Amino acid sequence: MIKCENIFKSFEGRTVLNDISVTFETGKTNLIIGRSGSGKTVLLKTLVGLHEPDEGEIYFDDTCYTKLSFKQRKAIRKDIGMIFQGGALIDASTVYENVKLPLDLFTEQSEAEKRERVEFCLERVELSHAPHLYPSELSGGMIKRAAIARAIVLNPRYLFCDEPNSGLDPQTSIVIDNLIQSITREYNITTIINTHDMNSVMEIGEKIVYIHTGYKWWEGTKEDILYADNKELNDFVFASAMAKRARGK
Amino acid sequence: MKFLETLGRYCILMGKVFSRPEKWGIYYRRTIAELDQLGVGSMALTAIISVFIGAVITIQMAITLDTPFIPQMMIGYATKETMILEFSSTVIAIILAGKVGSNIASEIGTMRITEQIDALEIMGVNSAAYLILPKIIATMIFFPFLAAFSMIVGMFGGFLVARMGVMLPSDYIDGLLYYFDSYEITYSLVKMTVFAFLITSISGFYGYYAKGNSLEVGRASTTAVVVSSIMIMIFNLLLTQLMR
Ligand SMILES: Nc1ncnc2c1ncn2[C@@H]1O[C@H](COP(=O)(O)OP(=O)(O)OP(=O)(O)O)[C@@H](O)[C@H]1O
Ligand SMILES: [Mg+2]
């Protein structure tokens, strides 16, 4: 479980996050949705500690992350996997080296043990054929999958995904969504996913938080979302024709 | 005011860069890679520029010192002194600031804007040290070697034009051997070590704090080259006062 209480964050006097309190549940795919620029990425980065909140507390299970020292945070970072909006693979390293990097940094395993683990993760994301390729040689979907492999290589307890399927075709998107969901269930991870894709919402939205202009505007499940009584949320949801049709049925 | 703020941020970053590394093995491997990329990768450019400048200085000196009162070997001597004292350290440093500095700033800047640095931070890495320290160590080790290399190649360039008939090659060699002071070489190599630190740390700084898009990265890399070049000039003056 990850919980944040009354988070505020502003940049140069402009408030981006306004009093956000949410609980994200373990073993479920928790979705943060909202329009472009609404503050999803900032919220995610604040949760993992890449931005310091101006106010508010963040809890990882029972530990209050915001009160920890740099050293203590490092221990929790080991349990965090993150997939960035653009993949953020290290350009100078191959897929194999990218996935191996967290093992180099956090473990004392032998090269053989590391190789076994990396190969397992690459297989999980169906990239066994591409360990020697550099990020510039990968397609968008392969980059996302390599990023997933890197994020899960240390068996994280918390998984953060910033728009894991943006820029991908609908079929590949669903493959990625389902991959993340099955990993979440299999290892009982607390997963938080940023998205503005209604397909993902209907596919894997076990818990959904709608962010609007930096405020938490609505929260619920994919079952409720089509019938929610909230103008901004409705505008967001029914901007997609598919959702309109679903409601029509 | 802006200057003091920038200087402060630079110092804080250097504090992060030089904090004790978590795992030596990784830094060792990265330093070797940087030695190859930043150091060995600059040898060809250094050689080309040095051989031509050595040749041109010899020709210029031959014209300037063309009087019966000055022995011909002074041409070789002047070429040697110019190369050792200023060209092979200061001018080569400025050229390397252009090549290596822009490379470092744009590489690290791109890593910043594509969230690669955030990804490293999430993995618990001290990203400043991980990215910048191996480059600083590699250049501080290798650039003095490049300076020495440039001296030799430059003097060879002079020899080539001497052979082509600008002067008697044997006089040229006599000039090179005339009044050899090893302190001059030490002085030049020490300067180069300082310049290496300036180029790498300043370029690393501008790259690390790049934000926005590719335009900003381009701008950061230009700023990095300009600022390192100016700093090289200032430190050249200071070190010359201090050491000579
Ligand atoms: N480092 C920063 N400094 C200043 N402002 C920032 C910074 N990061 C984000 N912002 C601002 O915060 C707001 C929210 O940005 P954010 O990246 O969270 O949007 P988002 O919801 O992730 O959008 P998208 O769906 O396009 O990724 C934007 O208006 C942006 O300009
Ligand atoms: Mg975003």
Image (cartoon, coloured by chain):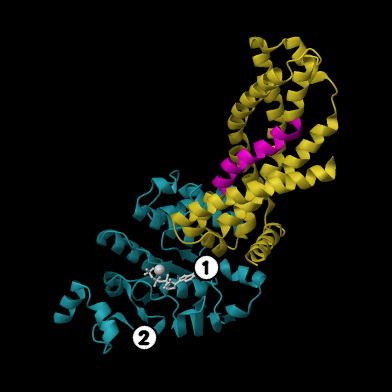
Chain colours: A cyan, B yellow
The numbered dot on residue A217 is 2
* Secondary structure character of the magenta stretch overall: helix
Query: Whereabouts is ligand 2, in terms of quadrant?
Result: bottom left
Which residue is at the front of the view, A83 or B160?
B160
In the rendered view, tell whether residue B238 sits above or below residue A79.
Answer: above
Q: Mark 2 near mark 1, Cβ–Cβ under 8 Å?
A: no
Which of the 4 image quadrants contains residue A217? bottom left
Label 2 CA crowd tier, 10 Å (few <14, some 14–19, many 20+):
some
Where does the image place residue B84, in percent across and percent down from the top left? 75, 30
The outermost residue toward the bottom is: A229
In the rendered view, tell whether residue B113 sits above or below residue B46.
Answer: below
Q: Quadrant of the N terminus of chain B?
A: bottom right
Q: CA distance from mark 2 to mark 1?
A: 27 Å
Q: Quadrant of the C terminus of chain B?
A: top right
Which of the 4 image quadrants contains residue B124? bottom right
Whether the magenta-drawn stretch holds residue B87 is answered as: yes
Where does the image place residue B78, in percent across and percent down from the top left? 76, 24
Q: Amino acid at mark 1?
A: Ile
Q: Which residues are magenta?
A: B84-104
Q: To which residue does mark 1 refer?
A: A80
Badge 2 or badge 1: first in the primary sequence = 1
Chain at tag 2 = A
- Viewer-nearest of discs 2 and 1: 2
Label 1 CA crowd tier, 10 Å (few <14, some 14–19, many 20+):
many
Q: For the point 62% across and 69% down, which residue is it?
A: A75
Q: Amino acid at mark 2?
A: Trp
Q: Is disc 2's CB within 8 Å of ligand 1?
A: no
Q: For the point 66% across and 69% down, which residue is it?
A: A71
Q: For the point 36% across and 63% down, which residue is it?
A: A179
Where does the image place residue A243, in percent across and percent down from the top left? 21, 76
Mark yes or no: residue A117 visible. no
Which of the 4 image quadrants contains residue A183? bottom left
